[in-house]
């Protein structure tokens, strides 16, 4: 006998996996301005339509051992990876928040920001359809959701977005080159709108640390010096999501490390 809680948890995992599968379609088609509804999913190599039974998230990729049924070309591990990330996030958010309005808001944010991250990885753009809509939806959510404080979200948007815009503007004026992209600034404002201003501070700090570690390792592997550009969006999204699951606790121990006299 499965308890109602575990069946709900399983349901969120499955919904996440399916939306991850849809996300794969969005990642590959949206930047090319193709319809995300038609035609149905195709093999990226031979363009044959994928059968319904071969289109089950995660499972089909495993059954077909990561190959197309027809041409036997490799189907990248990226596809099941996006599905697993979404599935695990949906499950974890449900377990963290239960059936609340905040859960709905965070599910939308988690899905859209993960998909936007992969588009950023592939194309170095964070489409406005994600970031700007995210800011609007986040602010409306903050106004309607009794568990959120609207002013926190507004400060997040204006403080985070405005502050970074100013930094980028000054950098541009002095260095005559773009440091941080406009998409990243809108992403920060989006994080602020959904998660509040504390998440903005956390995300900027955390993504800088994680970003420089990963960037350093990447540059060392490439042996092309520090000029290698890797998109910043995925680090911001990772940090925003990390904030949901333990931001305040991490922030607390981080501050303790440098300012132990606070305790
Ligand atoms: Zn094929």
Image (cartoon, grey):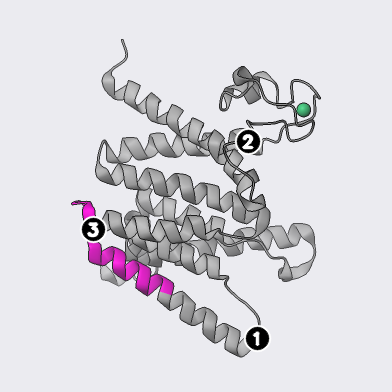
**Dot 1: within a 10 Å radius of its alpha carbon, few (fewer than 14), some, or many (20 or more) residues?**
few
The quarter of the image that holds ligand 1 is top right
Distance in Å between CA atoms under marks 2 and 1:
39 Å
The quadrant of the image that shows the C terminus is bottom left
Of the pair 158 and 201, the residue shown nearer to us: 158
According to the image, label 3 marks what residue? 143
Left or right of 45 in this view: 98: left
The magenta span reads 143-161
Kindly give the residue lying farthest to the top in the view shown. Answer: 1
Vertical side of 212 occupied by 159: above or below: below
Which type of secondary structure does the marked residue at label 1 adopt?
A: loop
**Dot 3: within a 10 Å radius of its alpha carbon, few (fewer than 14), some, or many (20 or more) residues?**
some
Q: x, y percentage for residue 137?
A: 35, 55
Of the pair 202 and 119, the residue shown nearer to us: 119
The reply to whether the magenta stretch includes residue 230 is no
Could you tell me if the residues under marks 2 and 1 are in contact, i.e. CB atoms within 8 Å?
no
Vertical side of 88 occupied by 160: above or below: below
Q: Which label sits on residue 79?
A: 2
Distance in Å between CA atoms under marks 3 and 1:
39 Å
**Dot 2: within a 10 Å radius of its alpha carbon, few (fewer than 14), some, or many (20 or more) residues?**
some
Q: Quadrant of residue 136?
A: bottom left
Which type of secondary structure does the marked residue at label 2 adopt?
A: helix
According to the image, label 1 marks what residue? 176
The residue lying at 71 percent from left, 70 percent from top is 226
């Amino acid at each position: 006998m499965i308890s109602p809680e575990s069946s709900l948890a399983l349901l969120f995992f499955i919904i996440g996996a399916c939306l991850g599968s849809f996300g794969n379609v969005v990642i590959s088609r949206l930047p090319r301005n193709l319809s995300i509804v038609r035609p149905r999913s195709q093999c990226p190599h031979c363009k044959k339509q994928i059968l319904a039974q071969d289109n089950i998230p995660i499972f089909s990729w495993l059954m077909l051992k990561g190959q197309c049924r027809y041409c036997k070309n490799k189907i990248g591990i990226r596809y099941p990876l996006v599905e697993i990330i979404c599935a695990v996030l949906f499950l974890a958010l449900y377990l963290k928040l239960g059936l609340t309005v905040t859960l709905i808001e965070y599910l939308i944010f988690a899905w859209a920001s993960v998909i936007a991250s992969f588009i950023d990885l592939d194309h170095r753009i964070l489409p406005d359809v994600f970031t700007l809509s995210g800011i609007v939806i986040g602010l409306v959510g903050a106004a309607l959701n009794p568990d959120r404080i609207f002013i926190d979200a507004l400060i997040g948007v204006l403080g985070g977005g405005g502050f970074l815009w100013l930094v980028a503007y000054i950098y541009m004026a002095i260095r005559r080159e773009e440091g941080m992209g406009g998409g990243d600034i809108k992403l920060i404002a989006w994080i602020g709108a959904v998660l509040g201003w504390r998440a903005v501070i956390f995300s900027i700090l955390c993504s800088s640390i994680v970003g420089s570690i990963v960037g350093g390792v990447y540059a060392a592997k490439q042996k092309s010096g520090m000029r290698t550009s890797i998109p910043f969006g995925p680090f911001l999204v990772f940090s925003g999501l990390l904030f949901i699951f333990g931001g305040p606790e991490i922030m607390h121990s981080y501050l303790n490390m440098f300012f132990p006299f606070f305790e």
